[in-house]
């Protein structure tokens, strides 16, 4: 992407002040700013992006996209050296520009992935397969919201054959905004769980919102086992129901999963049975786009694990299954089953943090985690957060208090983990993103 700051202002329905500069990159993170970067300060729950405009300017930002309230100060301070672009809502302005950018580059096929869990893994699988023979633009990392999607689509250029993006939603109406930015040719709904139930109130509302990813021209791929197919069908479009296409699945511990697709056998480097569901959706989409089973096998064997999504990390004397990007009832249950089934010569530990944004279902969901943990094959269970107290109560009532530790304090959790972990152990770390459970790596590196 290369555009003048004046042209950006015109296309985003904003006003331009200061010098005209050339923009080749856009970011919300001041640490990623370089020359020719447009910085978009965002006000979040914990961080105010306007506190970092000075840092962005010092790093060479060529422009800043601001709301009207901050405009006078920023124009006064920076208009002599950079462009100051003023909009009622910077996020909406960026979304408007991104949608026009995509419209002007609409020579590619778009694939959009949504669901309560498994979005990133499914997206990575589809992108890995399509990349064998094509040029693919894919959502980097977790840019799957109305904040991240506009940045992701700006990576599309004239050489792109396929754009594979996540569309994560946490409130009603958000999917409408996303499909306006990128109307999908193909769509995937991985599942309908209880993530973000606090805002949606019912799973039926979650299903309706996610089903909005299906436009009249969209070909949708959905698990045949989905309990909300009636709601999804109401969205229209063409619906493909997906079953397991693999004739053989062999779980090989931390090495991955041995799969056979048609005449092709291969190793997919992914840990956990739940990856079969995601891979099945990827196969369905890629076959629909004309990929052969040979190409699909090659693409899935090239899969690379991402941060926080069942990634295997060796922390000195300890092996970690790092699954701390997010946590839902389905994904936590899958993780417990995975570590329980793994053969391991030393001890196994399960460290779980709260599952957030479950609303009225939180107590029941955490209780069900406790029930799943009752049968877990492991030496120690460490639970972190106020909501995980319900899981602890279930374990206590079932006579398993001796191997369980619960605390609302991260410092206490870290200290106990360091105390009970031994050299050679396998440790599962999982919790909602806001808990930043990856901080426990520092503790585990000290185990000898």
Image: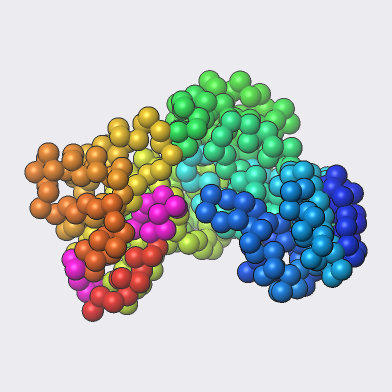
155 horizontally vs 206: left or right:
right
Q: Is residue 108 above or below residue 175?
A: below
- Which of the two residues, 386 or 314, is positioned nearer the viewer here? 386
Residue 425 within the segment the image draws in magenta: yes
The answer to whether residue 55 of the structure is visible from this angle is yes
Identify the residue shown where x is 74% and y is 48%.
69
Q: Quadrant of residue 74?
A: bottom right
Q: Is residue 405 left or right of residue 246?
A: left
Choose top left, top right, bottom left or bottom right for residue 154: bottom right
Is residue 249 or residue 94 the one in the foreground? Answer: 94
Residue 420 horizontal/vertical position (percent): 18, 66
Task: Point out the stretch of residues depicted in magenta.
Answer: 419-437
Residue drawn at (35%, 72%), measured in percent from left and top? 442
Which residue is painted at 79% across and 65% down in the image?
Answer: 77
> As drawn, is 105 to the left or to the right of 284?
right
Give the residue drawn at x 56%, y 34%.
Answer: 171
């Amino acid at each position: 992407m290369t555009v003048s700051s004046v042209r950006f202002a015109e296309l985003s329905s904003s006003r331009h002040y200061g010098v005209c500069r050339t923009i080749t990159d856009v970011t919300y993170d001041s640490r990623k700013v370089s020359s020719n970067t447009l910085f978009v300060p965002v006000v979040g729950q914990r961080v105010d992006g306007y506190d970092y405009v000075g840092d962005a300017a010092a790093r060479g930002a060529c422009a800043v996209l601001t709301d009207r309230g901050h405009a006078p100060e920023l124009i006064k301070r920076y208009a002599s050296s950079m462009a100051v672009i003023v909009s009622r809502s910077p996020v909406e302005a960026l979304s408007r520009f991104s949608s026009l950018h995509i419209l002007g580059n609409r020579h590619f096929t778009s694939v959009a992935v949504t669901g309560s869990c498994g979005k990133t893994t499914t997206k990575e699988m589809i992108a890995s397969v399509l990349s064998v023979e094509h040029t693919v633009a894919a959502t980097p990392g977790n840019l799957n919201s109305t904040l991240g999607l506009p940045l992701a689509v700006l990576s599309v250029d004239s050489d792109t054959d396929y754009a594979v993006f996540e569309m994560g939603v946490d409130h009603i109406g958000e999917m409408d905004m996303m499909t306006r930015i990128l109307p999908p040719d193909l769509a995937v709904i991985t599942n309908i769980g209880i993530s973000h139930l606090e805002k949606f109130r019912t799973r039926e509302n979650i299903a309706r919102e996610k089903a909005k990813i299906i436009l009249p021209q969209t070909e949708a791929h959905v698990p045949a086992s989905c309990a909300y197919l009636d709601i999804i069908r109401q969205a229209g479009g063409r619906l493909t129901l997906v079953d397991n296409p693999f004739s053989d699945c062999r779980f090989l511990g931390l090495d991955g999963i041995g799969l056979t697709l048609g005449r092709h056998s291969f190793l997919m480097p992914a840990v956990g049975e739940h990856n079969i569901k995601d891979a099945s959706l990827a196969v369905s989409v890629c076959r629909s786009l004309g990929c052969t089973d040979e190409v699909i096998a090659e693409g899935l064997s090239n899969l690379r694990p991402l941060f926080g999504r069942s990634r295997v990390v060796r922390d000195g004397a300890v092996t970690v299954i790092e699954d701390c990007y997010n946590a839902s009832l389905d994904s936590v249950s899958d993780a417990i089953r995975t570590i329980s089934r793994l053969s391991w010569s030393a001890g196994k530990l399960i460290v779980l943090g709260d599952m957030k944004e479950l609303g009225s279902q939180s107590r029941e969901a955490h209780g069900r985690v406790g029930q799943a943990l009752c049968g877990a094959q492991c030496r120690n269970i460490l639970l972190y957060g106020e909501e995980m107290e319900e899981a602890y109560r279930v374990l206590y009532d079932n006579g398993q208090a001796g191997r369980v530790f619960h605390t609302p304090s991260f410092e206490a959790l870290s200290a106990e983990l360091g105390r009970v972990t031994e050299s050679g152990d396998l440790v599962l770390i999982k919790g909602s993103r806001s808990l930043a459970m990856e901080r426990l790596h520092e503790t585990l590196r000290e185990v000898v």
